[in-house]
Image: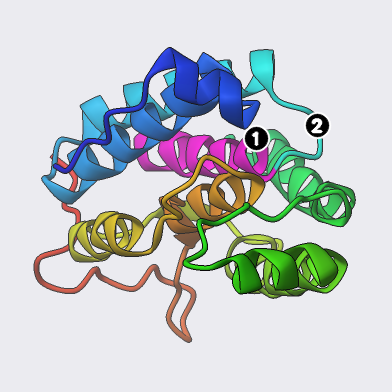
Amino acid sequence: MVREDWTFKDLIAAGWSEADLEWERRTEDSLSALAEGRVDEARAGFANALRLARAGFAANDPRLAASLSNQAAAVATENGSGTGQIRAAAAQAWSACDSWIDKMTAPRTARSSMFHLRMERLHRPAYEERWRVKGRELLADVREEVCADETLEFVGRHEAAERVARWHRERPVTLSDPRKLMAAVILLAAREKRFGINGDALPREEGRLQQQ
């Protein structure tokens, strides 16, 4: 697992808290555990990440929505039922994220010349709006995946591993609002439970999560 070496000074400069970074780490570790078939460890990790999100994030923060979805999947995986309340809370949280996107600020990236710095300053509003458009597109994809009135379940082992790898490839190199959003979207461990035409749950493909 690739770790980034952020310092407390980096967090202060970016306007981040230790909770912001710790949520990322706990959620990534839990998704990695899921990819390796360590289901109980994944459940415990997602529960810890949810406690952190509830204590430190706003109600419209997409990371809170992601944690609620992950917890709904964890409960369903363990109990097979009793997830209606938390699933509804997750759907409500995802719906509230639009107001978070509206206030999202784009990262300030290093530029190679004074010309690029000047152009970024001149076109900053347009630059930030492009990030907001991308954010709304990401939210739409997530809502389609986990916000229907269906039971949630964990993604399989292969998909969990792919999501961890995608996070390592695509996470922004700066501590920023877009990074918070992408963490919520990419480190999502939940999906709608899939059923066949007779109403039975579809079997997981080979290599995916198997219950012990």
Question: In this orientation, which residue lies closer to the viewer: 7 or 22?
Answer: 7
Return the residue at label 2.
Answer: 59
Q: Tell me: residue 127, above or below residue 71.
A: below
Give the CA separation, mark 2 to mark 1: 7 Å
Magenta residue check for 137: no
Q: Position of residue 155 (x, y in %)?
A: 34, 58
Q: Quadrant of residue 157?
A: bottom left
Write down the region rendered in magenta: 62-79
Dot 2 crowding, Cα within 10 Å, few <14, some 14–19, many 20+: some
Question: In this orientation, which residue lies closer to the viewer: 79 or 192?
Answer: 192
Residue at 35% over, 56% down: 167
Q: Position of residue 151 (x, y in %)?
A: 56, 55
Residue at 51% over, 35% down: 71
Quadrant of the image for the C terminus? top left
Question: In this orientation, which residue lies closer to the viewer: 50 or 103?
Answer: 103
Return the residue at label 1.
Answer: 64
Q: Amino acid at mark 1?
A: Leu
Task: Tell me which numbered mark, 2 or 1, is placed earlier along the sequence.
Answer: 2
In the picture, measured across the screen, residue 179 lies left or right of residue 103, that is: left
Secondary structure of the residue carrying tag 1 is: helix
Q: Position of residue 34 (x, y in %)?
A: 23, 44
Residue at 80% over, 31% down: 59
Quadrant of the image for the N terminus? top left
In the picture, measured across the screen, residue 11 lies left or right of residue 61, that is: left
Which disc number belongs to residue 189?
Answer: none
Residue at 65% over, 64% down: 117
Does the magenta stretch mainly form a helix, a strand or a loop? helix
The single residue placed furthest to the front in the displayed view is 114
Q: Position of residue 128 (x, y in %)?
A: 77, 64
Secondary structure of the residue carrying tag 2 is: loop
